[in-house]
Image: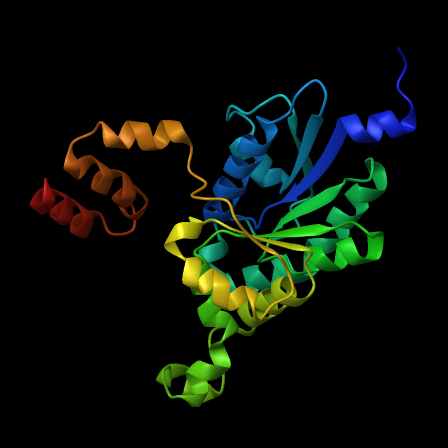
Amino acid sequence: MELTDVDEALLSCQILAIPYPGRGHINPLMNLCKLIAATSTPNHLLQISFIVTEEWFSFLKSDPKPDNIQFLTIPNVIPSEKERSKDFEGFVKAVFTKMEAPVDSILDAVPKPNVILADSFLPWAVSIGERRNIPVASFWPMSLTIFSIVYHHQLLLANGHFEAAANNGRCGPPFLLQVVSQLANKAQYALFTTIGALESQVIEALQAEVSVPIFTVGPTIPFSDTEFKTNQPTCHGLMINLRTLFYTYPKEVSCLYQKNC
């Protein structure tokens, strides 16, 4: 039996996922996308397009993923992941000013998605959604408490709770304030990687101040990872967490590992 356009709309949901180009942002969003993709059924098909730079695609293409998640790539318009620490401010500026256009061009070439699922650290994603009349779910890959602290930065300044910021009249980098403002005032949904019961007071207080609906999605960590770490010796988790520091501070990390194991 052929499906009408209306039937196809009911049976298919297209999601466009746009992560901030950093491992600590890409991993949580990909894990969330995998959880969403797993809910696809024959009567409600889900297709997720995950946008990354060509460089990041080369890092991720061999990782296992569901068939209903596909990669879409944009040119390497930002500094290389391998070099970004040398000029982090320049990297952030490039993300804010050079990624929007190629991502917008992708939307000209693919079916209109039902929703854009974008990292909160990409405020221009909300602007794309506004121009194209596509709802945007802003994904904050940290606790809601951290978001609330930045959102209420003026109180920190007014009460002298953040002396370093008081010296220059601001709390945190300007781009972070822009990120928080876009999420709170322009996005249609706000997703936080937290457990609602653990931050219920923060959720209640913040929801009374912002119009965007707040949703908690829990820790975006693959179950297999948590199961693996649970079955390891106590020091094994420390070893995993220190692995990313080893090449920068090999002597210090080795010493710390020996003391704790």
Q: Is residue 30 above or below residue 179?
A: above
Find residue 143 and report its horizontal and vertical position in percent.
43, 56
Q: Is residue 153 above or below residue 211?
A: below
Q: Nearer the viewer, residue 113 or 124?
A: 113
Q: Quadrant of the N terminus?
A: top right
Q: Residue at x 49, y 87 (%)?
A: 169
Q: Nearer the viewer, residue 159 or 178?
A: 159
Q: Residue at x 56, y 39 (%)?
A: 56
Name the image colouring.
rainbow
Find residue 118 and report its horizontal and vertical position in percent.
63, 49
Q: Is residue 21 above or below residue 224?
A: below
Quadrant for residue 226, please give it. top left
* Number of marks present in the image shown: 0
Q: Is residue 9 above or below residue 202?
A: above
Q: Nearer the viewer, residue 166 or 257?
A: 166
Find residue 101 and report its horizontal and vertical position in percent.
76, 53
Find residue 44 and report its horizontal and vertical position in percent.
71, 25
Q: Residue at x 61, y 65 (%)?
A: 184
Q: Quadrant of the C terminus?
A: top left
Quadrant for residue 233, please give it. top left
Q: Residue furthest top?
A: 1
Is 96 placed left or right of 5 in the picture? left
